Image: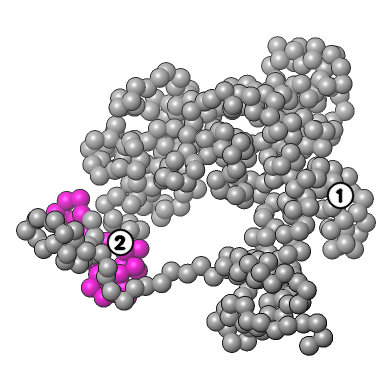
Amino acid sequence: MNGWAECVVLSGPFLVSRTGDLTRIRNGLQNYIGANRSAIEDRDTNTTKLPHDYKYKDAKPGDPVAPKFIMWSKDDKALAAYKQKTKVEEDLRVSFANWTTHPSNPRFAMAIANRMWKRAFGQGIAEPVTNIDDPMQSANPELLKHLAEEMKRVKFNLKNFMRILYNTRAYQSEATTEHIAMGEPYYFQGPILRRMTAEQAWDSYMTLVVGEPDKYKKPLEDLYSKSIDLDLYNPKLDAQTVLIKYAAYQNMAAKERAMMGGSLADAGEDMMMDKGKAKGKGAEKPDMMMESAGFSQGGMVLRRAAELEQPARNGHFLIEFGQSPRNLIDGSSKIGSVPQVLMMMNGDAQMLLTNSDSRIFKTMEKVSSPPDKVEALFMSVLSRRPTLAEKGIAQRALSSGDDGYANMIWALINTREFIFVQ
């Protein structure tokens, strides 16, 4: 075969060089295909059984546990959500999904509404939000029931529901700064002053650094969704198809790895060249310097938190600011720490903002006069115009040297107004 040996890898033939590293190629291909073949399979029998020391009268030890919908009161059985098939094994998952999301489910709409209320106000009507068995134990049972009805009325459209909350007088009232003792009810005279979540803080940084983080997706994820369609059980799958797609996967992975150590300018130039070739235009386009889909700086990939590895690596901005380790539901934290302060003052994320290639600097370059630059800076960071006193402070800062604007950015992102939800 002229230097080539044929072997079988996973489900199809795969050609490798005799001089190549067969183990490395096989492991790489297994990882590549494994990412595209996740599946859920049903079992033929119910393996969940009661424990050997079960002593209640309704069943015997070792009996199979029959599926049954949760009911919070005797009246729940009459609700439409409970009119689901539960006898046929094949329908169990569908029946459970229909029951869970049914508008007449006694807790589904209420639980969603309670979580959305906490997102807006910083405190759920029923705490903790993971336990809503008894609505009467909440801070305001009537409000909780009303919100559940509103959630049903808007047909579980979360954007429409949040629009209702944000337009309430309660939400638009001044934020509460007083400490609320654990277990004490809060009557929502206004939202609670709270720090942004790790993801919100990171996305705020990325907006100031790259402009529109929603544009930037994982290159490999795009490759999976658009270019890779490997069905291992497809009889038409051949070695050539696997090789072509695996080569594309390796090429994209190599590009992303190469960009991991590059600068903002290097990454921007790479992106400009790619776009120029794709569109038949020249690569010289300075305003696209930051428009890379996957570049990094200081070892941090510059994309939205939702587009990054979860949880992030130790020492990453997201981890330091309380990103959930995903060991528990709602495992995130908003507790302050010294590392957070240090990261805000002189960490890698802060350095990205004061880089002359950042979007906030590009925004200030659109105006010429120092007062207009200061106003653009305040609008970008704090979403408001500076006061007269702040303009005076800014004027003195700008007269101190070439680092005046970078110092102002540093000062503004370290204010409580930036990191806290007002």
Q: Residues within 10 Å of mark 1 (few under 14, many from 20)?
A: many
Q: Is residue 289 above or below residue 347?
A: below
Q: Which residue is mark 1?
A: 269
Q: Nearer the viewer, residue 179 or 157?
A: 179
399 lies left or right of 33: right
Residue farthest along the front direction in this orientation: 19
| Nearer-N-terminus badge (2/1) | 2
Residue name at image x 75 percent, y 48 percent = 260
| Quadrant of res 53 | bottom left
Residue farthest along the left direction in this orientation: 57
Residue name at image x 34 percent, y 22 percent = 181
Give x and y (percent) for residue 388.
71, 13
Amino acid type, label 1: Glu
Residue name at image x 60 percent, y 23 percent = 341
Give x and y (percent) for residue 396.
80, 12
Q: Which residues are magenta?
A: 71-98
Amino acid type, label 2: Trp
Q: Residues within 10 Å of mark 2 (few under 14, many from 20)?
A: many
Disc 1 element = helix
Q: Which residue is mark 2?
A: 99
Residue name at image x 38 percent, y 47 percent = 112
